[in-house]
């Protein structure tokens, strides 16, 4: 899994994500965006972890990749996005399988 956080995303960055996100919901202008890329199974679990951990919105970001990797965008205030990303990393490192 690869993870990054963008604090105060630019208009252009938000436009890219809005064009490629799975839903058509208008999310406004978030304080931060967490990006998580990995295999489908990892991304479904990461979305679940993020939404249960704090008040963030998780969207799948469409693309096509032959390695079956997908991208999630986690939208919210900076503290919530950081907390969600930390929880994802913590749970990923403690997998029991």
Image (cartoon, rainbow, N blue to C red):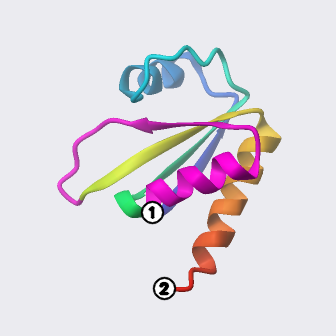
- Disc number for residue 87: none
| Secondary element type, mark 1 | helix
Residue on which disc 1 sits: 42
Looking at this view, name the residue that lies furthest to the right. Answer: 79
Direction left: furthest residue: 66
Residue 56, percent across and down? 69, 37
Circle 2 — which element? Answer: loop
If you read the primary sequence from the N terminus, does the residue marked by circle 1 or circle 2 appear first? 1
Question: Where on the picture, by quarter, is residue 17?
Answer: top left
Residue at image position (59%, 22%) is 10
- Left or right, 42 with reference to 11: left
Which of 37 and 27 lies nearest the eye of the viewer? 27
Find the magenta span and give its range: 42-67
Up-down: is 22 above or below 3? above
Q: How many marks?
A: 2
Residue at 22% in and 43% down: 64
Image point 56% across, 16% down: which residue?
11
Q: In front: 24, or 4?
A: 24
The answer to whether 27 is drawn above or below residue 35 in the figure is: above
Q: Is residue 19 magenta?
A: no
Q: Is residue 65 above or below residue 86?
A: above
Give residue 86's quadrant in the image.
Answer: bottom right
In the picture of the structure, the residue carrying the numbered disc 2 is 97
Q: Measuring from the top left, give residue 55's x and y in whole percent.
A: 75, 38
Crowding around mark 1 (Cα neighbors within 10 Å: few <14, some 14 to 19, many 20+) is some
In this rendered view, identify the residue nearer to me: 6 or 26.
26
Q: Residue 71, relative to residue 49: is it above or below?
A: above
Tell whether label 2 touches label 1 (CB within 8 Å).
no
């Amino acid at each position: 899994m690869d993870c990054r956080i963008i604090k105060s995303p630019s208009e252009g960055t938000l436009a890219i994500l809005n064009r490629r996100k799975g839903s058509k919901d208008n999310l406004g202008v978030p304080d931060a965006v967490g990006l998580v890329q990995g295999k489908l199974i990892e991304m479904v679990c990461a979305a679940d972890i993020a939404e249960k951990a704090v008040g963030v919105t998780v969207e799948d970001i469409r693309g096509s990749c032959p390695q079956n990797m997908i991208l999630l965008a986690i939208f919210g205030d900076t503290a919530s996005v950081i907390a969600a990303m930390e929880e994802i990393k913590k749970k990923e490192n403690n997998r029991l399988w």
